Image (cartoon, rainbow, N blue to C red):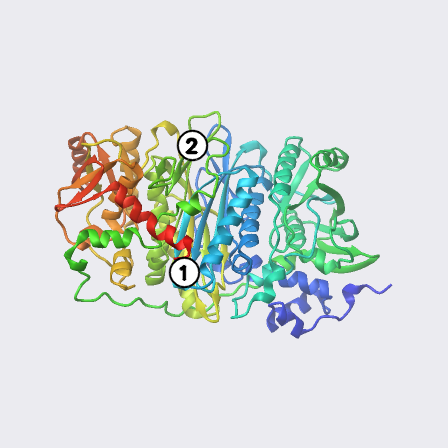
């Protein structure tokens, strides 16, 4: 019988359709010393896609600091792992599902959430918290409401059914995302340090086991689709969007964690992007072994599937694992109990080849080392990143010289408006360990804090979790924007009293083949690296999402940072709500000096101009440590970092979060003071301002008394607004938008 792996049924033209250029196709010919079969070409195309190989970014990702004494596992596995004491570990990662969510928002979002949770429990961690970072187009764009509805419902539908709380995130709007929304999902899990599982470790002559749901034809070439920009018409990509089932994933989670307690697993890998292809190749590569798969034995939900379809399908809720020889029957009993498919579909070998048999024939025979090691690495040309418009020399005065008119505009703009309609679709309290959620203000229930806080069962400690990025800064100055995303994550965690430990990232950019986009990417990476190093805040996992553009229109560069920190006693954790009247309101870190790239000039003056705020990393570290010390010593009563909208918005959010305690501001200042977005700043309240001011003087920390708290109103320079009015303003835009008005 003729070996189909030797058939000359691939062409350069077909390779180009699969995203392989002429040079890459020639590399495949050189590796195989023959023309690849159709199945082999498909495997090379997904493994060498941008989504799987990081061929445009690998060179620059090496610049990121990834190590610290508390880091157990950095980049290179399903997720990163840090030591949180008591023999426990936090496992976390963030990933994108951008293109699928634009094509099919509900399923794109659900499978994004499901995929990132599998990355966590594949390593032995039980997911304890989800976060998300969402970017949509202009609210007036005809597709935006449809996309918002679908994505939010998808996130809620999957996370809620899994019983994992969604504890915070971001939802922002900008016209740069009109043709390419961003859906970034983050999961944090908890595991014992001696029960962490990896893809590495397999040896020859071990059983390869398929577990989970059956394989269908959904998601074929999803990784390739995610590695190309959209054209105006992309409906033909709909078949590449996967379909998720959270109830199957819940069973898979419990079955995997039960099996992990029985010490039968040698290595394990989630079937994510590129499905059975990437999982089998990763296990082979990391073990320095080969694999031979009998694809007839793969559980299938559709008839007459080909080897090509089985290997490239991205059907959800599936895992590949290597078991200790002889444990197959005992393992199968566990999966039978949970009503999940379990099939031995092959064995590991010592020849370092990926071999696929089906219908009595061999469809693929690829040497694994060059498939992985010789995947292309590109040092893409870097041009000049686009420059922002300069600030108007005449300035940006308050409209009608009315501070509250500007405040009302900002408070009701899409980015600052209440996201209660969105947030309340997510179950944030399931599991019963969430003590604070990030971004909870106004009429929402729960405790508001700059980062979400999730207790560790059986302990006093808690994890602080946040996601952050300011894309307008990253567009204006990619290096400073990258620094700022890390610094804001650091501040949000510090503002709760937790010590920032590590970050994951989701690097969302346009087409790297355009030099100006590559300049944005490299600038952002180098900014993240500089901040992570200076703040002892290493990058332990992440995801790169490129080609986020449609018909040549790129998104704003959006390198989202997901941060995790630890507080030893959750009862000391600090919220952002004002607590009682008569307390001093202090600004830590200096006053505003520049309106560049502020929300104020964007929303009040319809301008996106100026440089991004400069980030002084030394000041960030010093001020963060100072705030954490005050919280640990119980010397302050509330804390909120100053970010979007500047000082006045920070104070207003603290008042709205309290629902009853407002502020009387004793200073009369200009718009720069109130709305500039200078970094490294916090607003705190205290019953003993002299003590805090004295400490600031001793430690050379900038401190300014702004006013004091009092009941029910916000008062500045003779103007007064009730907290009820502030909350109504904050909810006005979202209520009207969701009504379609």
Q: How many neighbours does mark 1 have within 10 angstroms: few (below 14), some (14-19), or many (20 or more)?
A: many
**Which residue corresponds to mark 1?**
557
Label 2 CA crowd tier, 10 Å (few <14, some 14–19, many 20+) = many
On screen, residue 529 versus residue 157, left or right, reads: left
Residue 443 location (% of width, % of height): 35, 40
N-terminal label among 1 and 2: 2
x 37%, y 55%: residue: 482
Instruction: Give the image quarter of residue 307.
Output: bottom right
Q: Nearer the viewer, residue 74 or 100?
A: 100
Disc on res. 198: none
Horizontal arrangement in the rendering, residue 285 relative to residue 77 (left or right): right
Q: In this rendering, would 377 be left or right of 330?
A: left
| Image height of 233 relative to 139, above or below | below
Q: Evaluate whether residue 623 shows in this view.
A: no
Please provide percent x and percent y for residue 436.
39, 35
Quadrant location, the C terminus: bottom left
Q: Which residue is mark 2?
A: 462
How many tags in the picture? Answer: 2
Q: Position of residue 520 (x, y in %)?
A: 40, 63
Helix, strand or loop for disc 1: loop
The furthest residue to the right:
1
The quadrant in which the N terminus is found is bottom right
Vertical side of 201 occupied by 1: above or below: below
Measure how far apart labels 1 and 2 are at the Cα level. 32 Å
Residues at marks 1 and 2 touching, judged by CB atoms closer than 8 Å: no
In front here: 198 or 572?
A: 572
Q: Secondary structure at mark 2?
A: strand
- Location of residue 247 in the rendering, given as x and y in whole percent from the top left corner: 62, 41
Q: Nearer the viewer, residue 609 or 739?
A: 739
Q: Note whether residue 98 is visible.
A: yes
Front position in the image: 644 or 416 = 416
Q: Residue at x 68, y 65 (%)?
A: 41
């Amino acid at each position: 019988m003729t070996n189909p792996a030797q058939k000359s049924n691939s062409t350069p033209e077909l390779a180009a359709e699969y995203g392989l250029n002429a040079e890459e196709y020639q590399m495949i010919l050189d590796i195989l010393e023959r023309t690849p079969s159709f199945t082999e070409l498909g495997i090379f195309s997904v493994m060498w896609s941008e989504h799987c190989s990081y061929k445009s970014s690998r060179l620059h990702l090496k610049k990121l600091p990834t190590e610290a004494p508390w880091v157990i596992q950095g980049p290179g596995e399903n997720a990163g792992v840090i030591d949180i004491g008591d023999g426990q570990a936090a496992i976390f990662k963030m990933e994108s599902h951008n293109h699928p969510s634009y094509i099919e928002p509900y399923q794109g979002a659900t499978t994004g959430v499901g995929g990132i949770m599998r990355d966590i429990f594949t390593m032995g961690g039980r997911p304890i918290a989800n976060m998300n970072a969402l970017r949509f187009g202009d609210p007036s764009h005809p597709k935006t409401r449809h996309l918002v509805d679908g994505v939010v419902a998808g996130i809620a539908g999957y996370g809620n059914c899994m019983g994992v709380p969604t504890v915070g995130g971001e939802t922002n709007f900008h016209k740069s995302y009109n043709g390419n929304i961003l859906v970034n999902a983050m999961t944090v899990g908890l595991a014992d340090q001696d029960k962490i599982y990896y893809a590495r470790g397999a040896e020859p002559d071990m059983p390869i086991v398929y577990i989970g749901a059956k394989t269908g034809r959904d998601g074929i070439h999803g990784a390739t689709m995610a590695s190309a920009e959209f054209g105006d018409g992309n409906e033909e990509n709909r078949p590449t969007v996967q379909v998720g089932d959270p109830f199957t994933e819940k069973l898979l989670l419990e079955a995997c964690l039960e099996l992990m307690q029985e010490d039968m697993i040698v290595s394990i890998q989630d079937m994510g992007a590129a499905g059975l292809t990437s999982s089998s190749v990763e296990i082979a590569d990391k073990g320095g072994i080969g694999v031979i798969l009998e694809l007839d034995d793969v559980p299938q939900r559709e008839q007459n599937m080909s080897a090509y379809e089985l290997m490239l399908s991205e059907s959800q809720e599936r895992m590949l694992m290597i078991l200790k020889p002889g444990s197959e029957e005992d393992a199968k009993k566990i999966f039978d109990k949970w009503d999940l498919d379990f099939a031995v579909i092959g064995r590991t070998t010592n020849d370092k080849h990926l071999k696929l048999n089906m219908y009595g024939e061999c469809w693929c025979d690829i040497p694994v080392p060059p498939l992985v090691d010789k995947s292309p690495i590109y040092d893409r040309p870097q041009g000049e990143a686009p420059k922002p418009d300069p600030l108007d020399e005449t300035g940006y005065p308050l409209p009608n010289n009315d501070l509250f008119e500007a405040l009302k505009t900002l408070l009701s703009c899409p980015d600052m408006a209440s996201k209660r309609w969105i947030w309340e679709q997510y179950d944030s309290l399931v599991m019963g360990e969430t003590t604070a959620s990030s971004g909870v203000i106004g009429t929402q229930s729960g405790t508001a804090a700059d980062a979400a806080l999730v207790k560790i069962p059986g302990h006093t400690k808690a994890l602080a979790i946040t996601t952050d990025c300011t894309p307008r800064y990253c567009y204006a100055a990619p290096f400073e924007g990258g620094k700022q995303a890390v610094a804001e994550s650091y501040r949000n965690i510090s503002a709760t009293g937790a010590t920032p430990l590590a970050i994951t990232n989701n690097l969302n950019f346009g087409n790297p083949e355009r030099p100006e986009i590559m300049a944005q990417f490299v600038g952002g990476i180098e900014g993240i690296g500089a901040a992570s190093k200076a703040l002892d805040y290493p990058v332990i996992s992440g995801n790169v999402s490129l080609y986020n553009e449609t018909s040549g229109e790129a998104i704003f560069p959006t390198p989202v940072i997901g941060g995790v920190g630890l507080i030893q006693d959750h009862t000391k954790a600090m919220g952002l709500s004002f607590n009682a009247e008569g307390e001093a309101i202090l600004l830590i870190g200096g006053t505003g000096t520049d309106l560049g790239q502020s929300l104020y000039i964007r929303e009040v003056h319809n301008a996106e101009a100026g440089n991004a705020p400069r980030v002084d990393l030394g000041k960030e570290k010093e001020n963060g440590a100072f705030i954490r010390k005050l919280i640990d010593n119980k010397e302050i009563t509330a804390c909120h970092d100053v970010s979007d909208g500047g000082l006045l918005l920070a104070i207003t959010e603290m008042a709205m979060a309290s629902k009853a305690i407002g502020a009387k501001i004793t200073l009369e200042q200009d718009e720069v003071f109130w709305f500039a977005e200078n970094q490294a700043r916090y607003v705190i309240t205290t019953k003993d301002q002299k003590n805090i001011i004295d400490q600031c003087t001793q430690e050379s920390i900038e401190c300014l008394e702004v006013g004091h708290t009092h009941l029910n109103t916000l008062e500045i320079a003779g103007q007064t607004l009730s907290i009820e009015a502030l909350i109504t303003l904050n909810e006005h835009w979202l209520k009207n938008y969701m009504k379609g008005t």
